[in-house]
Image (cartoon, rainbow, N blue to C red):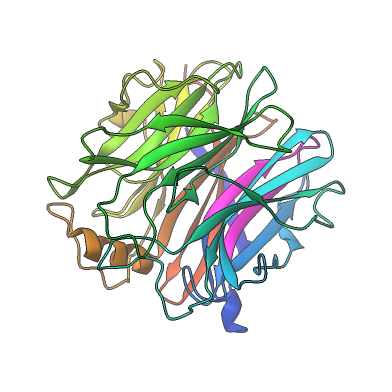
Amino acid sequence: MRVIDEGTVFVPPESPACDRVASFTSLFVDSRGDVIAGFQLGSAKHGIDASLRLCRRRAGEREFTTLVDRFPTTFAGRPGTLAGAELIEPEPGRWLLATTWFDRSEPERPLFDPVTEGLLRSKQLACESTDRGQTWSQWRELPTPGLTGCALTGPLIPSAEGALGLTFESFKEFDDPTPARHGAWLLISEDGGRSFPKVQLVARDEANQVYYWDQRLCPTADRRGFVAAFWTHDRKSQRDLPVHLARGRLGAEATSQPINTGIVGQIAAPAELPDGRLALFVVDRNTPPTMTLWMSNDGGQTWPADQRLVVYNHDEQGQLTQTAGQIDFVEYWEDMRKWTFGHPSLRPLPTGELLATWYAGVPGWMGVRWAMIDVSPTR
């Protein structure tokens, strides 16, 4: 594997302040081969002014240009912020975008309550475009019945049977005094994303000791199943575990727990190649901080370290307090706000390469980078 080209999706300007911090990246390749890169944009991560931006790179071109500057952040008459711009094309020319909306009607409240360990009230929203992103419908809510503290965690995925899966996780809300319980879920649509009435469990530790955070899913090469990768955290031992992996099918509840890949890191974006190899693009915030592409030749059973490709090395200048040895959960959430790189996205291109994006920068100034990677098998 090798990086054959790289560049920037977005370089933050000196002003306005609301355009200086990009994070929470996403990738989408439409039916024409155009690439859409999405990300949160504001004056800070989860800042009070955070919205979404979409940038487009047309098929055959190299540079990204702005497609949508900002999306409206008010919903049902209440001010809010947006996090994540996940796109899919259920049918040619009709794009569906999903995001998480956080209620900011009390702007002094942080995203995470250090006392209750709950999150701001949130809703999962969707809108559509039938002119390839030039105009968009108004937001509509995607209910998550019985689940609170919810947030989207990665791409929507299709199945060969025509269903769509929207990935999200549940936790608890800001003022909830009861103990938190984490779960990784899917909303299932069988009508092209017009409704998502079914909820499917992907992963949850019944002992509530291990959190399968920030799941990222990709369809299998035949679209008859999916691969899920998890940033995995052990509350009891107060440390991150290696990246975990699971397989499943849309509409079928999980029958086994995710397995340990042995890969050290946090968020991991998977992509299954047409020849059956499985790629994982992993952010590792330990020393040295890196964005690394791993490859498995046996469906995720083994991940040879001598075949990994370090795509990006980062100089972390955030004033962090937590180390890999033992993590204070509340302080870890504060570190998440300070991290200045990460959030991997990965997509196969029609030409056979993999395209990766992530955010990177320094405190108060973060942009979005991309790399194109040749994954031709070595002979």
Q: Could you say which quadrant of the image residue 51 lies in?
A: bottom right
Residue 154 is at least partly visible in this image: yes
Relative vertical location of residue 154 with respect to residue 99 in this rendering, above or below: above
Q: Is residue 132 highlighted in magenta?
A: no
Residue 309 is at least partly visible in this image: no
| Near-viewer residue (288 or 216) | 216
Using residue 181 as the reference point, say whether residue 282 is left or right of it.
right
Give the image location of residue 194, x and y in percent.
74, 38
Q: Point out the residue furthest to the right here.
A: 131
Give the image location of residue 268, x and y in percent.
41, 40
Relative vertical location of residue 366 with respect to residue 296 in this rendering, above or below: below
Using residue 33 as the reference point, say whether residue 40 is left or right of it.
left
- Residues drawn in magenta: 24-40
Residue drawn at the location 77% of the way across and 58% of the way down:
138
Using residue 38 as the reference point, say whether residue 183 is left or right of it.
left
Q: Main secondary structure of the magenta part?
A: strand
Residue drawn at the location 23% of the way across and 65% of the way down:
331
| Near-viewer residue (132 or 165) | 165
Q: Could you say which quadrant of the image residue 70 lies in?
A: bottom right
Give the image location of residue 171, x and y in percent.
37, 50
Q: Could you say which quadrant of the image residue 351 lies in?
A: top right
Q: How many marks?
A: 0
Residue drawn at the location 51% of the way across and 58% of the way down:
122
Residue drawn at the location 17% of the way across and 60% of the way down:
328
Give the image location of residue 255, x and y in percent.
37, 18
| Near-viewer residue (291 or 170) | 170
